[in-house]
Amino acid sequence: MTRITYVNGRYVPSLEAQVSVEDRGYQFADGVYEVCEVWDGELIDEGRHLDRFYRSLAELKIAEPAARPALKVVMREILARNRLANGYLYIQATRGVAHRDHPFPDPPVRPSLVVAAKSLAPEKGEAAARAGVKVIVTPDLRWKRVDIKSISLLPNVLARQEAREKGAYEAWLVGDDGLISEGAASNAWIVDAGRTVVTRQLDRSILRGITRTTLIELIAAEGLRVEERPFSLKEALDAREAFITGATTLVMPVVEIDGRKIGEGRPGPVATRLRALFHGFAAHSN
C-alpha cells in the first residue's frame, strides 16, 4: 500500500512529498517535531504529545501551523489513509520558507507542517525487550535547550552511530558534571539496591519525555518509589536494573552498559512489569 503524507495542506504519496530547499528546517534546523505512538489503531498519550509540540513551538517563537483541533483532524486522516495499526505518527513544523538569512523572516512567513506515518512490528520490540539491550556512554555534546524537541539532532545522530558501531542499541549521554543526562533518543532510568526507580529530574538538560511522564504515574500506582535526580555511571553499573523509555521503545530493559552487565545481565522484574502494564495505563485516543 502506498504511504500517504500530509504536507502543507495536501495529502500526497510519501514518495512525492516535497518541501522547498529554502525551508528554514532544511537550512537551519529551525523547527520542532513530535512522535506519537500508535498502538492497536489508537494514538497513545496524544494530549501530552500535543502539549509538548505546542510548547516547543512557543519556545522557539514559531507560529502555530495549525490550531490544535485542526491538527488532530490531520493526524486521524493520516492514521486512516495509511491504515496504521501499530507504529507512530511523525509531526514536524518549521518556521517556513524564506530567503536564507539567520534572523526570523520579516514579515513572518507561513510555517510548514508535515505529518507522516510509519508502521512498526510489535514483535520486534517485544523480542528486544525479552533479551534486553546494550548501551554505551558518551559525552553529551548537545545544545543547552534539549527540553525543546527541536529537529536539530546532529549530536544525537553521532551518538547513535557510535552506539551502532559498538554493537549497542542506545547511547547514554554524560554531561560536564559527570552525570548521565539521558539517552540520545530516550530517557535513562535505573533501579537501585533499595528498588527505588531513579531518573534525572526535568530541567533544560533533558527532554520532557511523554512516556517518562506516564511511567512515573504508573510507578506510583504500583507502589514503587521514584527519585527524580541525576545519577552517575558508577550508580548505573551498580544498579539492580536499568532501562530506557521513549514513544517507540516504551520501557526497554538495559542489560549491559559499556560492556559491563547490569544486575544479573538479563531484563529485571521492575522494567519487565512496567512494560507489560504500560499500554493499559497510558491514555488512548482514537
Image: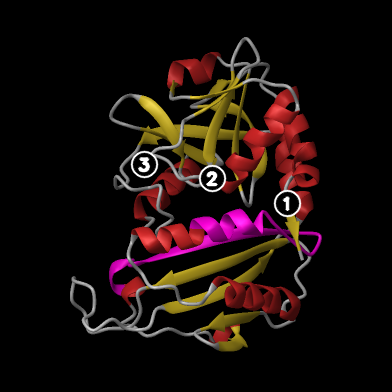
Of the pair 272 and 72, the residue shown nearer to us: 72
Up-down relation of residue 3 to residue 187 (above or below)? below
Tell me the number on the disc at residue 203.
none
Report the quarter where the N terminus lies. bottom right
- In primary-sequence order, the first of circles 3 and 2 is 3
The amino acid marked with disc number 2 is: Gly
Residue at the disc numbered 1: 283
**Residue 168 image position (x, y, % from top left):** 54, 38
**Residue 248 image position (x, y, % from top left):** 63, 52
Whether 46 is among the magenta residues is yes
For the point 73% across and 51% down, the residue is 283
For the point 77% across and 46% down, the residue is 279
| Few, some or many residues within 10 Å of mark 2 (<14, 14–19, 20+) | many
The amino acid marked with disc number 1 is: Ala
**Residue 267 image position (x, y, % from top left):** 71, 27
284 left or right of 47 in image: right
The amino acid marked with disc number 3 is: Arg
Report the quarter where the C terminus lies. bottom right
Residue at the disc numbered 2: 209
- Residue 43 at least partly seen: yes
Helix, strand or loop under label 2? loop
Residue at the disc numbered 3: 204
Q: Which segment is the magenta one?
A: 27-52
Up-down relation of residue 44 to residue 225 (above or below)? below
The answer to the question of whether label 3 and label 2 lie on touching residues, with beta carbons closer than 8 A, is: no
